[in-house]
Amino acid sequence: MPSALQRVLLAEPRGACAGVHRAIETVERALRIHGAPVYVRKQIVHNEHVVRELEGRGARFVETEEEVPAGAVCVFSAHGVSPQVRENARRRELTVIDATCPLVAKVHQEAVRFARDMDTLILIGHVGHEEIEGTYGEAPERTVVVGSVEEARRLDLPPDVRAAYLTQTTLSVDDTAGIVAVLRERFPELTGPASADICYASQNRQNAVKAIAGRSDLVLVVGSANSSNSLRLVEVARAAGAEARLLPDPELLDPAWLEGVRTVGLTAGASVPEIQVERALRLLAELGYGDLETEVTATENVVFKLPPELEEQSMAKHGGDTVAGPPAAVERGVVEEACGKLLDRVDRRIEELLRAEEARWNAVDARVAVPVSVIAELIAAGGKRLRPLFCLTGYLAAGGATDEDTVVDAAAALELLHAFALIHDDIMDNSPTRRGVPTVHAAYTDLHARRAWAGESRRYGEGVAILAGDLALSYANRLAGRLTGPAAEVWHELAAEMIIGQQLDIALAAEVKADPDLARWVAVCKSGRYTIHRPLALGAAIAGRPGLNGVFEAYGVAAGEAFQLRDDLLDAFGDAAVTGKPTGLDLDEHKMTLLLALGAAKDPRVAELVEGSRRADWDPAGLRAALLASGVRAEVEERIDALVADARTAVADAGLPDHWRLRFGELADMVAYRDR
């Protein structure tokens, strides 16, 4: 009879990531638009279950684009393709739908840039993997592939070579770090990407496996044998000290594996649908492992837009008609698609501006273009694009339709203004990392030190960062230059408020003053107005409806305070691997956050640690422990819930259509309950 102690420890996050969901839905949508057959180059994702399901619906999987009949529909898999494949498809007049994961596409962009600027591009990954084949094809004449520490040690390059490296997104974090360390030791001038190329989903799943491995007698990883990220999960579990097995299909679970096993750890690779995990859980329950515990290490809310080709082909196929459905849901879908298209234009606008500026200044001297490159790399590294999103949302909610160029420029200006704020904020906060990579001042301080240049390394690094931030502000004002009337007033007020809020922020930190009212004012000024209210008002003003400002102020201040409180919680109690920046920095730098001010007002011990301390005896670890013990974390969560409710009420009473009320509610949830 099975022991009551037999249980399953389920990792979360696990299974299909945003890129996989996007790829699968791309094929499904293509089949609905074009009908069967739709040809897919390679496996759309590395999972046999998914491939069989799609084959049953009419997808035809082929090894090369040459096997696709001329003129037919061809979907490129999530792993990306080389320029030669794209040229072959063009030559054969294929109707191409590109399902390349956006994170893989970013690596391709970096490969093009490094191949242009460097003698050699080193790809860290596995020869023969589709992702590496596609990236290698961007510059085959100057690219080498390195798959292990041993290969890195044997790599034969001239000692003075100008080299850069990129990584396959699905590799093990630890293995990649080892290879990079060897390469840096051998080639001290080695350049890397602006952000880590291991994707958020792979890293989250590896972190989750590490969390369950120490408590499991056996870790089962659901995933196909050709799935690189699934194989990496097995390796990570074994490295953490657990026995681990790959489970290509739940039906292949061998009861003999469970002999002497009390706790089974269960996870799934990033290309595995949840239905396979559910099947594995049912089979384990039948074998006596019915006690289930979920280990949550991160919450994922990433969503990638579908390829733009699908929208264009759908409109061409149906003559511009949309599929009928519930009115609010259909309208909301239309709104999301319209906003997505405008966001794409915003990204292109920024990219075009920075590419032109980089070329302009590179023509003078490569060193002159460094601040431009810094801005481009920071923006390319990701970010939530919240300010452009709310600006475009305000424009569309206000009925904007005739001035898209102006609102795209304004939204791009907001993102560049945010780059300015981040670069300078990182200096003031002494932050070593941003979005998972060294901050600008830290990176250039390190570069100065490694190259043994004259002067003080820290001053050099901070000088580069200050100039890059200033240049980002200059570009932001250039793009905002066409704004007039109420829109111009909103723009200038937004920029001034953000800077003034930052001044009060550093003043409260210096004076160690626990004042909840002033701390809230900083939160509202730096987040509520700057992130949500003013961008919404800016979009509405461009659309010719500045009268919506009152509604957007009530909504934006509430949602923005919730956003800042979540930021405070993530800094104090979050996971650096998820947030992409070190946690605890606010406490380290004794910033008087709203969380800390509320904690001091609530608990005498927190107040004593805050107000009785100065820099010399500041105790971040003690403060964090006191904050946890005070119960303020739960109180802040309740406050966030109330603020989200206030934000929803603000738009509920504004006379907006149902689909807009739903959309604004979703956005409030997104900013208030995020995990990074």
Image (spheres, rainbow, N blue to C red):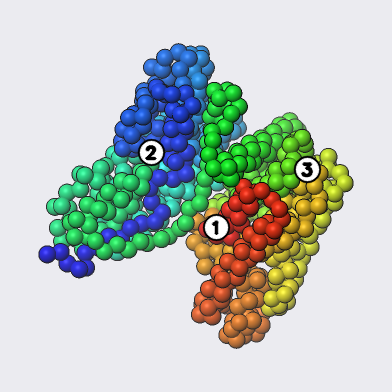
Quarter occupied by the C terminus: bottom right
Q: How far apart in space, not on screen, are marks 3 and 2 (Cα)?
A: 53 Å
Determine the secondary structure under disc 3: loop
Q: Residue furthest right?
A: 485
Q: Sequence-wise, which precedes: disc 3 or disc 2? A: 2
Q: How far apart in space, not on screen, are marks 1 and 2 (Cα)?
A: 35 Å
Q: How far apart in space, not on screen, are marks 1 and 3 (Cα)?
A: 29 Å
Tell me where residue 37 sits by quadrant: top left
The residue located at (78%, 55%) in the rendering is: 549
Q: Sequence-wise, which precedes: disc 1 or disc 3? A: 3
Q: Which residue is mark 2?
A: 147
Q: Is residue 194 left or right of residue 275?
A: right
Residue 108, position as x, y percentages in the image: 52, 33
- The answer to whether residue 155 is visible is no
The residue located at (77%, 35%) in the rendering is: 402
Q: Which of label 1 and label 3 is nearer to you?
A: 3
Q: Which of label 1 and label 2 is nearer to you?
A: 1
The residue located at (59%, 83%) in the rendering is: 603
The numbered disc on residue 543 is: 3
The residue located at (61%, 82%) in the rendering is: 602
Residue 55, position as x, y percentages in the image: 34, 29
543 and 322: which is toward the camera = 322
On screen, 416 above or below 590? above
Q: Which residue is mark 1?
A: 674
Q: Is residue 82 left or right of residue 334?
A: left
